[in-house]
Amino acid sequence: MAARTMGEYRPLKETISSMKSFVSGPQTVSGLARSAAFACALIAAGSPLAYAQAPQPTVESPPPAPTGMSESVAAVVNDQIISTYDLGQRMRLLIATSGVQPTEQTLPQFQREALISLVDESLQFQELRRVEREQKIDIIAGNEEVDQEIADMAQSNNMSREQFLQFLQSRQIGIDTLRQQIRAQISWARWIRGRYGSRLRIGDDQIAATQAKMAADAAKPQYQISEVLIDANRVGGMQQAMQGAQQLVAQMQQGAPFPAVARQFSALPTAAAGGDAGWVGQGEMPPEVQQVVEQMRPGQLSQPVAVRDGVYIVYLRDKRAGGGTTLVNLKQAAVALPQGADEAAARAKLEQLRPQITSCDTLEAAAAKFDGVVASDLGEAELSDLAPQFKTAAESLQVGQVSEPIRTGAGLHLVAVCGRRAAGGANMERDAIENRLYGQQLSMIARRYMRDLRNSATIETR
């Protein structure tokens, strides 16, 4: 038995052979993730991707139970054994939740991903137990937490707990396999948040810089993408990452749902949301990915894209051109006057009202104190589409300011500018920016933590 890196796991013939019966019929079942630790909602697959060429296979009767599967050692992690039975069970769970069709070509990838996951979980539990002993605290999730997570998964799929467990049993997946994965993910997320979460500080300068960048990018093209990153450090190198990504692309082109694949294989924080990264602009993607996305059309799936940390797969859901115009949000207080009518009284009334409007929020209440003055929200419009009188006022006013009385054919108006932004995308709230930066930093810390655990561990395979 020789020590190996994570990328050097050779096929375990016994496990592969025992899984052959699982490939006897179509098994596409996709996962609908909860935003909590583990995404394992199980439904009949249906590809949402416009690029799928092959018809979606239907789910047939469950495969026969594997025969001749004797339990032996698949790997040893710091003297802790991972059996071939554990490996086979995890492979079944991955197949059931990823939507990727098990074939002779994809089984080795399932085996590698399953073994990596089991090794990572072993390292996590070993670290958590060490911390519990040294610090005299409880971190590892109890049975009640795990059972509640399983109940939530069943409910999110419109199943009872019993139906959910029967589904797993129909795929020869032991409940202990699911429980182990859930327990590891809940416990590890709790430890990372507890150890590092309170130390992270997102400064006002970081938020301001992000807001400034978003404002500058609003006039540039934006892309609504879903993403998968195969982490080269995790799978054993760029060659393994590229091979795995190529197999996943081939499977998604045949109908495997992108969200299910992302949840099971992606190393990005967006994995929990099925890879949904939302709208991103230039500079928010790795340069290699941005070059590819700029050449894609909505509905297209990229080929694997090598980046510094691994290999990306991107699905372009939509894109929009950058806005060269300005959008303004306006409110008004107006007095109706026919053409040619004496406007002196109305003008005096609006002049008296104007200093009482301290913000857009106070405009309606202030206007209500004056007979004949009607307040209204004009909503958001492009500056270039406004009536000439309103456009001149909106161009010269700052947000929160109120114009002098403006004469139009309908009467006299006070116009308040309540918001201004460049066309091309909605502004992100400060709290949303802070949460996004916080999540990115916490995810980076967690990945580095796991990398250090792997590098210092003794991992042996047979």
Image (tube, rainbow, N blue to C red):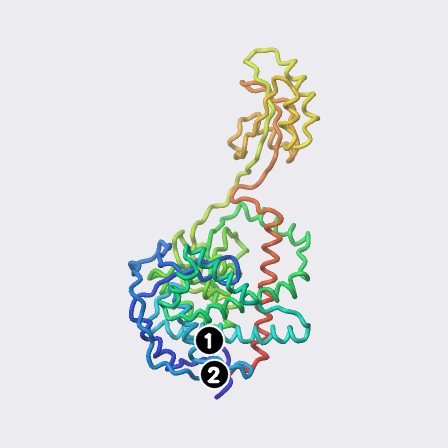
Instruction: From this view, report whether residue 236 is shown above or below residue 96.
Output: below
Q: Is residue 315 above or below residue 386?
A: below
Mark 2 Cα shell of 10 Å, populated few (<14), some (14-19), many (≥20): many
Q: Which residue is mark 1?
A: 115
Picture quadrant of residue 70? bottom left
Residue occupying the point 47% across, 60% down: 151
> Could you say which disc has been placed on residue 412 in the image?
none
Position in image of residue 392 (x %, y %): 59, 28
Q: Quadrant of the C terminus?
A: bottom left
**Outermost residue to the bottom:** 1
For mark 2, give the secondary structure: strand
Residue found 68% across the figure and 25% down from its top: 354
Rendering coords of residue 52 (x, y %): 33, 57
If you read the primary sequence from the N terminus, does the residue marked by circle 2 or circle 1 appear first? 1
Which amino acid lies under the numbered mark 1 shown in the image of this protein?
Leu
Q: How much space separates mark 2 and mark 1, taking CA atoms?
A: 10 Å
Q: Amino acid at mark 2?
A: Thr
Rendered position, 69 above or below 362:
below
On the image, the x and y values in percent for residue 435 come to 60, 54
Question: Can residue 361 be seen at all in this image of the molecule?
Answer: yes
Towards the viewer: 199 or 340 = 199
- Please tell me which residue is depicted at 51% across the width and 42% down the height of the picture: 323
Foreground pick, 214 / 368: 368
Query: Which residue appears at 69% of the width and 31% of the height?
Result: 358
Q: Which numbered circle lies on residue 461? A: 2
Let me know if residue 291 appears in the view: no
- Confirm or deny contact between disc 2 and disc 1 (CB under 8 A): yes
Q: Is residue 412 left or right of residue 307?
A: right
56 horizontally vs 149: left or right? left
